[in-house]
Image (spheres, rainbow, N blue to C red):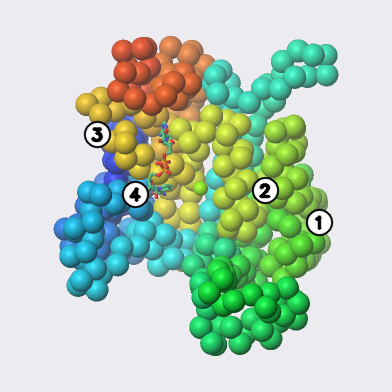
């Protein structure tokens, strides 16, 4: 049966890269209908809700979303008046993409970082013989997407109930008992066994399917014992009982950030909680070209999946007469959607086309040329968003 994709362009450059990506999907022969899901700042302004119910209903119905980016903290000056009006009505802005992740419990986040041959932004290092080496980076990060430090359970100047709970903890009494209450700011790091098991299982299942020999857990279990520690214990148990043929490696997040700049080729599948997964995936993304190349998938237990680049809406680049941003992260995210839909052949063709464009090196967006992003970059030889997409389309058509 014909598929329907819920397209959520969002704000700023999210719209630009998503439009180009859909052009590419069509040329590549991906047969689907597209419906637009309203999301973002525009709908906050128009109707006081950046994530309208009709968008949720669309995703509930069609289950597959392709998302651009949203602006989660709009420029104060332009919006103060409006914000006041909405707030008077009791409406408070909150990030619609975070809302979407929470509403659909998109708890599994997958972020692959694979270097393209010929990408001028690839990480290089000095080899043993003194020459320059370019290690191949090919890592897939599994990040728990709904719990941990980003779940928003926080306080400053905690009330009596919270304070009473804190003072029941011996470490708090030992280290903070004499601190004035208004001096306290607290963000909790809540892990559940269910959520932790799901992300660890997802990582191991992927490793098994793709033939990896190990999975690396990247946390800090010796220090953060109740959460990282639990994740480590669960990972060990899952490995021993269900995946004895795959090794479990254990690295600390801080050391991992150092190791990935020394020998990134040693890592394959990585699993982590929400915040450390965020950090380590940005670290690896930096080795393969940064935000213009970093893609992601997010999925729920109920079979809802949303695919999006990890970059944001980059508002300052949204209004240039000619768009300059790199669409590859969005295109790669769409390829992850194709993999998910078992449209492997189309995904392979698009990735090949992207790889050819990068390897040839004739079409490069400003970020690939290490320029500062401004309206002049086109006159200095950088490709526009459209030209990059056209380059990819040309390769697709040549086959
Ligand atoms: P950002 O990712 O939008 O942009 C940061 C910088 O990265 C840009 O100024 C630009 O230099 C570069 N960049 C980003 N995407 C690029 C691309 N495709 N090609 C070339 N260069 C690119 O992050 P920023 O500026 O911190 O946030 C802007 C807005 O986006 C904020 O409102 C933020 O909350 C929101 N945001 C939304 C996300 C989402 O929708 N999932 C994720 C991250 C930020
Ligand atoms: Mg991030």
Mark 2: few, some, or many residues within 10 Å (few <14, many ≥20)? Answer: many
Q: Residue under circle 3? A: 319
Which of the two marks, 4 or 2, is nearer to us in this view?
4
* Residue bearing the label numbered 1: 244
361 left or right of 237 in image: left
Looking at the image, which residue is at 80% across and 61% down?
Answer: 222
Relative to 347, 280 lies left or right: right
The local crowd at label 1, few if under 14, some if 14 to 19, many if 20 or more residues have their Cα within 10 Å, is few
Q: State the residue position of label 2.
A: 270
Structural distance between the alpha carbons of marks 1 and 2: 17 Å
Q: Is residue 172 above or below residue 51?
A: below
Q: Nearer the viewer, residue 311 or 344?
A: 311
Mark 4 vs ligand 1: CB below 8 Å: yes
Residue 116: image quadrant is top right
Dot 3 lies on which element? loop
Q: Are marks 3 and 4 in contact (CB under 8 Å)?
A: no
Spatial CA span between label 3 and label 4: 15 Å
């Amino acid at each position: 049966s014909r598929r329907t994709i819920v397209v959520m362009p969002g704000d700023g450059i999210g719209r630009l890269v998503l439009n180009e990506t859909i052009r590419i999907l069509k040329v590549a022969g991906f047969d689907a209908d597209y419906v637009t899901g309203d999301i973002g700042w525009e709908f906050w302004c128009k109707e006081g809700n950046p994530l309208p119910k009709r968008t949720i209903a669309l995703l509930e119905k069609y289950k597959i979303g392709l998302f651009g980016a949203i602006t989660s903290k709009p420029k104060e000056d332009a919006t103060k008046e409006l914000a006041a009006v909405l707030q008077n009505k009791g409406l408070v802005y909150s990030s619609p993409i975070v809302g979407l992740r929470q509403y659909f419990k998109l708890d599994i986040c997958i972020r692959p970082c694979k270097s393209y041959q010929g990408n001028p932004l690839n990480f290089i290092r000095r080899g043993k013989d003194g020459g320059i080496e370019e290690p191949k980076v090919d890592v897939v990060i599994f990040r728990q997407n709904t719990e941990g430090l980003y779940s928003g359970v926080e306080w400053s100047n905690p009330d009596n109930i919270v304070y009473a709970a804190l003072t029941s903890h011996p470490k708090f009494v030992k280290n903070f008992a004499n601190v004035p209450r208004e001096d306290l700011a607290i963000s909790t790091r809540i892990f559940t066994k269910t959520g932790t098991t799901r992300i660890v299982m997802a990582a191991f299942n992927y490793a098994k399917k793709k033939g990896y020999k190990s999975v690396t857990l990247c946390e800090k279990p010796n220090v953060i014992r109740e959460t990282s520690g639990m994740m480590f214990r669960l990972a060990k148990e899952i490995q021993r009982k269900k995946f004895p043929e795959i090794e479990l490696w254990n690295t600390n997040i801080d050391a991992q950030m150092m190791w990935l700049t020394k020998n990134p080729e040693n890592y394959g599948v990585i699993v982590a909680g929400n915040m450390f997964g965020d950090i380590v995936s940005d670290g690896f993304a930096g080795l393969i070209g940064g935000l213009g190349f970093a893609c992601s998938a997010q999925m729920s237990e109920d079979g809802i999946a949303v695919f999006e680049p990890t970059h944001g809406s980059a508002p300052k680049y949204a209004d240039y007469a000619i768009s300059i941003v790199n669409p590859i992260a969005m295109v790669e995210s769409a390829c992850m959607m194709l993999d998910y839909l078992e449209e492997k052949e189309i995904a392979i063709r698009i990735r090949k086309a992207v790889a050819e464009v990068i390897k040839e090196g004739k079409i490069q967006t400003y970020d690939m040329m290490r320029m500062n992003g401004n309206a002049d970059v086109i006159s200095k030889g950088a490709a526009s968003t459209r030209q990059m997409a056209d380059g990819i389309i040309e390769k697709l058509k040549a086959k």
